[in-house]
């Protein structure tokens, strides 16, 4: 197989049944804003990072107020193709870009009321 022509990883549906988030919001913010880690800020406006943030994806500034289930958010970050087959968001879980713990940290940051 030629370099750059690797097939995408299989689509992964994951279960997330936690009723509360016990992640580290400060670490989640670092992951979401670090260009070489999560880099969510490249496409989304994030809480506390509205200026200079991306506008390709929807704003996540008010994410906590949307009251979306944790299972939805975890799946959306782990492998968005399950919910939107044509999603432009990176496939963080199957590509082993972020661990489950790191995703929980990002979620804790997004759901924190500021």
Image: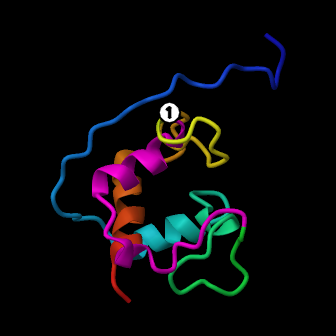
Q: Is residue 9 magenta?
A: no
Q: Which residue is mark 1?
A: 94
Q: Is residue 107 above or below residue 95?
A: below
Which one is in front, 110 or 30?
110
For this orientation, the residue located farthest to the top is 1
Q: Is residue 76 magenta?
A: yes
Q: Pinpoint residue 97: horizontal percent, then vertical percent.
A: 54, 44
Where on the picture, by quarter, is residue 9? Answer: top right
- Residue 105 x, y percent position in the rendering: 37, 63
Q: Is residue 25 visible?
A: no
Residue 9 is at least partly visible in this image: yes
Residue 1 placement: quadrant: top right
Q: Residue 50 falls in which quadrant of the image?
A: bottom right
Q: Secondary structure at mark 1?
A: loop
In the rendered image, the vertical position of residue 8 relative to residue 107, given as above or below: above
**Along the line of sight, the residue nearer the viewer: 112 or 96:** 112
> Which residue shows up at 55% across the image and 41% down it?
84
Total labels drawn: 1
What residue range appears in magenta? 56-81
Residue drawn at point x = 69 percent, y = 77 percent:
53
Q: Residues within 10 Å of mark 1 (few under 14, many from 20)?
A: some
Q: Residue furthest left?
A: 19
Q: Is residue 99 above or below residue 67?
A: above
Give left or right: position of 108 versus 40.
Answer: left
Q: Which quadrant: the C terminus?
A: bottom left
Q: Nearer the viewer, residue 8 or 69?
A: 69
Image x and y of residue 80, in percent: 51, 43
């Amino acid at each position: 197989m030629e370099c750059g022509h690797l097939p995408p990883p299989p689509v992964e549906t994951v279960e997330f049944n936690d009723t509360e988030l016990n992640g580290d919001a400060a670490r989640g913010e670092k992951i979401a804003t670090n260009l070489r880690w999560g880099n969510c800020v490249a496409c989304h406006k994030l809480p506390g990072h509205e200026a200079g943030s991306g506008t390709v994806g929807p704003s996540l500034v008010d994410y906590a107020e949307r009251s979306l289930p944790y299972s939805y958010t975890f799946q959306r970050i782990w492998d968005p193709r399950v919910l939107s087959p044509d999603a432009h968001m990176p496939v963080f879980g199957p590509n082993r870009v972020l661990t489950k713990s790191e995703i929980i940290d990002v979620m804790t940051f997004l759901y924190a009321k500021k």
